Every structure is written in C-alpha cells, then in structure tokens.
Image (cartoon, rainbow, N blue to C red):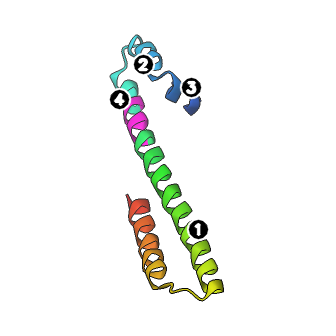
C-alpha cells in the first residue's frame, strides 16, 4: 500500500499524521515518515541559509558597483564577495 500525503500537510500537522500511521501498526512506514520529516527540516534550513548567503552576495555586488561609481576602494568588498560562493557551495554539498 502506498500512502501519498501532501508534504505541506505533514509539515503542518506532523504529530497527528504520525499518530494516525502508528495506529496502522506498520513501523516501517512510521520510520520512513520520521526520516522524511527530519530530512525535510534539514533541507529547508540549508535552503534558508543558502538563500540568505545569495542575498548577501547580491547586496555586496550592488555595493561594489556603487563604490566603483564613486571611485572608492573596493578591496574589502571584493574579499567578502570572494568568500560567499565557497560558503554557498559548502552548504549545498550537505
């Protein structure tokens, strides 16, 4: 038997979904649900962090553009900008 449950429903009411599946006395299905829920939570956390880093990268890029237009020193901004892609790649490898 294959159970298809909307991921949004699982995220919103995990304890209730788990309790209902436990009533069916199939620990394998409950184990899969717990594993999925844990992995989903980890993925969402990593996604939020990588999105935050991309936002910082975009902000720094804009600051570099403005600093160049004013003729200001951009070395420190470039140094920051160089580290962000590596951080993003490190997060995405997890």
Q: Is residue 2 visible?
A: no
Q: Contact, CB < 8 Å: mark 4 with mark 1?
A: no
Based on the picture, tell me whether residue 35 belongs to the magenta stretch.
Answer: yes
Q: Which residue is mark 4?
A: 31
Q: Is residue 4 magenta?
A: no
Tag 1 residue: 58
Q: Nearer the viewer, residue 1 or 86?
A: 86
Q: Which residue is mark 3?
A: 9
First along the sequence among labels 4 and 2: 2
* x 42%, y 34%: residue: 37
Q: Are marks 4 and 3 in contact (CB under 8 Å)?
A: no
Which mark is in front, 4 or 2? 2
Q: Earlier in the sequence, mark 4 or mark 1?
A: 4
Q: Is residue 12 above or below residue 63?
A: above
Callout 4: 10 Å neighbours few (<14), some, many (20+)?
few
Q: Secondary structure at mark 2?
A: helix
- Real-space Cα separation, disc 2 to disc 1, in angstroms: 39 Å
Q: Is residue 24 left or right of residue 3?
A: left
Q: CA distance from mark 3 to mark 1?
A: 33 Å
| Separation of marks 4 and 2 at Cα, in angstroms | 13 Å
Q: Nearer the viewer, mark 3 or mark 1?
A: 1
Looking at the rendering, the stretch of residues picked out in magenta corresponds to: 33-39
As measured in the structure, the alpha-carbon distance from the residue carrying label 4 to the one carrying label 1 is: 40 Å
Circle nearer the viewer, 4 or 1 = 1
Residue 61: give x, y in percent of width and height: 58, 74
37 vs 79: above or below: above
What is the number of the mark on residue 15? Answer: 2
């Amino acid at each position: 038997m294959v159970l298809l449950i909307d991921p949004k429903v699982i995220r919103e009411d995990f304890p209730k979904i788990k309790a209902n599946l436990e009533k069916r006395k199939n620990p394998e299905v409950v184990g899969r649900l717990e594993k999925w829920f844990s992995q989903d939570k980890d993925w969402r956390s990593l996604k939020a962090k990588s999105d935050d880093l991309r936002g910082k990268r975009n902000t720094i890029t804009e600051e570099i553009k403005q600093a160049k237009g004013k003729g200001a020193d951009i070395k420190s901004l470039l140094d920051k900008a160089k580290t962000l892609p590596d951080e993003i790649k490190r997060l995405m490898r997890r």
